[in-house]
Image: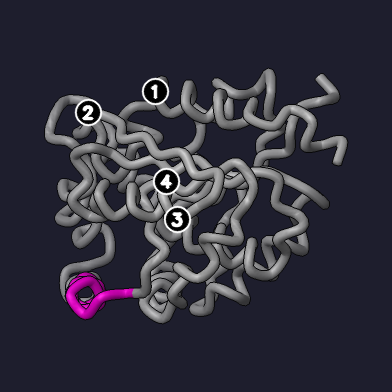
């Protein structure tokens, strides 16, 4: 199909294209999906500028966690290029001292125990404790191996130093889908619901049976919600 919307998918921390595979296949009839690898920089603006340099002229974008921060950066730098926005398991708020300390501990553990050992110890916090969650943990380890420790450290620093994006929310006038996992203890659904309320065309959904890694934990539900979101403004490409 020639009228498929260009959809840029941005992975989260220590994630790759693998976290979006189900969505790429499930939306193939309506979306021309592009997955950006995360540049190994410690600055979100620098990462966003490189992504924009290689992205389609106009596009829909969905970002997971760290990828959500990059969605805000893309919008801040080039709002005229963003047709629709998806913010998954993410927040507009700056880093808290508690989360910053947790990142520091993870970095120390990676140095002392080994990068993948740290990843294995950390992954249970990000998924629902069931059979699918165990499968997702293994997929997270594979992605971490591909991303590597150096990029992980850079991305941790970028996330820690991110801006407060709350002032951008009233200006995001494109159809915006905010998705949370109901069981997410990393980015609480209540925080994401509040964020969606501040976005003029923001729509919030909490997905049951999913924690932070919703695109892999509950792929079918995510695909259905993304399909409705992408259909929200079918004439966007003609604008």
Answer with left or right where residue 122 lies relative to residue 32.
left
**Disc 2 or 3, which lies upstream in sequence?**
3
In this rendering, which labeled residue sits more in front, label 2 or label 3? 3
Residue 4's spot in the image, x, y percent?
76, 27
Q: Residue at x 42, y 64 (%)?
A: 92
Give the residue displayed 61% in from the left and 47% down from the top. Answer: 61
Q: Give, as a single range, the part of the protein colored magenta.
A: 95-108
* CB atoms of marks 1 and 3 within 8 Å: no
Mark 2: few/some/many CA within 10 Å (<14, 14-19, 20+): some
Q: Is 45 on the left or on the right of 19, as rendered?
A: right
- N-term mark: 1 or 2: 2
Distance (Cα) linking label 1 and label 2 = 10 Å
Between 93 and 148, the one lying in front of the other is: 93
Q: Which residue is mark 4?
A: 88
| Residue found 77% across the figure and 58% down from its top | 80
In three-dimensional space, the C-alpha distance between marks 2 and 3, rounded to whole angstroms, equals 26 Å
The x and y percentages for residue 46 are: 62, 76
Residue at the spot of label 2: 209
Observer able to see residue 14: no
Instruction: Tell which circle, 3 or 4, labels the residue nearer the N-terminal end.
Output: 4
Residue 100 falls inside the magenta stretch: yes
Disc 3: which residue: 198
| Mark nearer the N terminus (1 vs 3) | 3
Q: Quadrant of the N terminus?
A: top right
Looking at the rendered image, the disc whose residue lies closer to the viewer, 3 or 4, is 3
Q: Nearer the viewer, residue 226 or 118?
A: 226
Which mark is in front, 1 or 3?
Answer: 3
User: Image quadrant for the C terminus?
Assistant: top right
How is the structure coloured here? one colour
> Which residue is the site of mark 1?
221
Q: Position of residue 60 (x, y in %)?
A: 66, 43
């Amino acid at each position: 199909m020639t009228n498929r919307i260009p959809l840029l998918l941005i992975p989260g921390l220590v994630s790759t294209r693998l976290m979006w595979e189900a969505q790429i296949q499930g939306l193939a009839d309506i979306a021309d999906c592009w997955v950006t690898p995360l540049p190994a920089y410690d600055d979100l603006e620098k990462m966003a500028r490189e992504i924009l340099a290689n992205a389609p002229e106009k596009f829909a974008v969905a970002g997971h966690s760290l990828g959500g921060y990059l969605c805000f950066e893309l919008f801040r730098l080039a709002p005229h290029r963003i047709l629709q926005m998806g913010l998954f398991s993410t927040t507009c708020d700056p880093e808290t001292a508690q989360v910053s300390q947790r990142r520091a501990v993870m970095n120390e553990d990676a140095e002392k125990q080994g990068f993948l050992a740290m990843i294995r110890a950390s992954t249970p916090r990000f998924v629902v404790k069931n059979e699918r969650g165990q499968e997702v943990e293994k997929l997270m380890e594979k992605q971490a191996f591909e991303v590597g420790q150096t990029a992980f450290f850079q991305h941790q620093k970028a996330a820690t130093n991110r801006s407060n994006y709350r002032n951008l929310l009233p200006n995001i006038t494109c159809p915006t889908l905010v998705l949370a996992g109901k069981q997410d203890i990393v980015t609480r659904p209540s925080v994401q619901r509040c964020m969606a309320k501040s976005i003029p065309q923001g729509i919030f959904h909490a997905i049951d049976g999913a924690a932070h890694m919703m695109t892999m934990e509950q792929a079918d539900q995510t695909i259905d919600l993304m399909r409705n979101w992408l259909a929200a403004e079918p004439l966007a490409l003609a604008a």
